[in-house]
Image: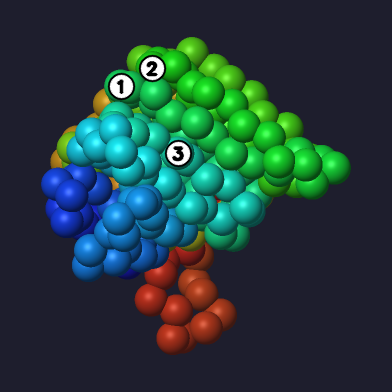
Amino acid sequence: VPRSGEYFVTLCDGSKVWLNADTEFEFPVNFSETIREVRLKGEAYFAVAKDLKKKFVVSAPHSSQIEVLGTHFNVEAYEDEPDVSTTLVEGQVCFHFSDKDYLAKKVVMKPGQRLVYSSTNGDVQLYATSCLSETAWKDGKIIFNNTPLDVALRMLEKRFNVTFKLKNARLKTNAFTGTFTEQRLERILEYFKISSKIQWRYLESPDIRDERSIIEVY
């Protein structure tokens, strides 16, 4: 799925998958008799059909896996980003990962939890969440809920196929709350400017073949 794009697919078992921008998703035409396994690089929301005899496994970058029987959850696992996050909306999932000593570990999640796994140091953090901000993208919305600026900019990069350059690192301490549906990128950035006094401007790319706009935030 290219940047600024989204896609929806129904798997052979009836499971539904919403794919966010800049995502690769690999799945078989038919699952095996013992397991339902798919591979994800990027972000997806899963509504997994229940099958008590055949578990559903999502293999993600950084040697992480999410194992379920039937549930609703969101996974953000981009290969070029060190963190993998899972947000559980309904049901139960088991998150498998490797700790700093490369030992296999797992965490069983409950609904209303967001797990963030750092592949850099092997740490896992659990946070309480309403799940709205993490899953809004599949409904065409962007929801910021006290979202740090650098995280908000990554969300906008995927949605609008642009690249942000954050010139002032101190701006990372800024956080934003708000809901956007069909607003243009420039309008959203103007809200940032009004609320936090940040500035932004388009930059000329040194590569004339670059189809992605570059925006400096300072």
Quarter of the image holding residue 53? top left
Q: Secondary structure at mark 1?
A: strand
**192 or 175, which lies in front?**
175
Residue that badge 3 annotates = 67
Q: Which mark is residue 82?
A: none
Disc 2 and disc 1 in contact, CB within 8 angstroms: yes
> Which label's residue is closer to the chain start, 2 or 1?
1
> Which label's residue is closer to the chain start, 3 or 1?
3
Find the distance from the CA under tag 3 to the CA under tag 1: 14 Å
Image x and y of residue 60, in percent: 51, 53
Above or below, 126 relative to 32: above
Badge 2 crowding class, 10 Å Cα cut-off, few under 14, some 14 to 19, many 20 or more, is: some
Find the distance from the CA under tag 2 to the CA under tag 1: 5 Å
Above or below, 131 relative to 9: above
Residue that badge 2 annotates = 111
**133 or 180, which lies in front?**
133
Above or below, 201 relative to 218: below
**Residue 154 showing in the rendered view:** no
Q: Which mark is in front, 3 or 2?
A: 3
Q: Which mark is in front, 3 or 1?
A: 3
Residue at horizontal 68 percent and vertical 35 percent from the top: 105
Image x and y of residue 210, in percent: 45, 79
Residue type (three-letter) at the residue carrying disc 3 = Glu
Disc 3 and disc 2 in contact, CB within 8 angstroms: no
Residue at horizontal 56 percent and vertical 55 percent from the top: 61
Residue that badge 1 annotates = 90
Image x and y of residue 160, in percent: 32, 55
Quarter of the image holding residue 161? bottom left
